[in-house]
Amino acid sequence: MNSNIDISNAELTILKVLWESSPRLSADIVIDVQKTHDWHEKTIKTLLSRLVKKGAVDFEKSGRAYCYSPRVNQQDYQKRVSSTLVDRLFSGRLSGLVSGFAQQRDLSRDDVESLKRIIAEWEEQQEQNND
């Protein structure tokens, strides 16, 4: 599925619930969203409807119940949004983003180790491509 769909922050909240577990009944989605957001059932169902119209979510009707599943892959969506953010705010330079986080927030030891692993894997892949 195309991950180039514009998704609002509120819609993303719904998608995150579906990415955790799907297919999901609308009633279950409402319960999960209301654990972290003070939103009315109608608001959540409106967001689900918007996501269906955008092609980000599919549904099946079973009797009187609706069961929803994401059509947008979480990893694909995250890659696109991350790339767009880096392009828009840091002229395509990932180092600017990482530097900003390092200066504004305390990076945990786990964050630093994860970044080191990512860089080491990238370097290894570059060496393999050059062989």
Image (spheres, helix red, strand yellow):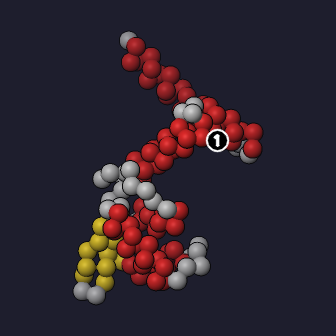
The C terminus lies in quadrant = top left
Q: Residue at the location (37% across, 73% down)?
A: 49
Residue 32 percent coordinates (x, y): 50, 75
Furthest toward the top, the residue is 131
Q: Can residue 115 be spotted in the picture?
A: no
Number of numbered discs overlaid on the protein picture: 1
**With 44 as the anchor, is 64 left or right in this view?**
left
Q: Position of residue 112 (x, y in %)?
A: 66, 36
Residue at point 69%, 39% (across, down): 100
Q: Secondary structure at mark 1?
A: helix
- The answer to whether residue 30 shows anywhere in this view is yes
To which residue does mark 1 refer? 111
In the shown orientation, is residue 82 left or right of residue 48?
Answer: right
Name the side, left or right, on which 103 lies relative to 93. right
* Amino acid type, mark 1: Asp
Q: Quadrant of residue 64?
A: bottom left
Q: Residue 44 in the image: state x and y as whole percent.
A: 47, 77
Q: Position of residue 97 (x, y in %)?
A: 63, 38
**Residue 25 in the image: above or below residue 81:** below
Crowding at mark 1 (Cα within 10 Å: few <14, some 14-19, many 20+): few
- Please tell me in which quadrant of the rendered image residue 63 appears: bottom left
Residue sitting farthest toward the bottom = 64
Check the image and report above or below for 76 versus 37.
Answer: above
Q: Residue at (52%, 83%) from the top-left corner? A: 40
Q: Nearer the viewer, residue 79 or 25?
A: 79
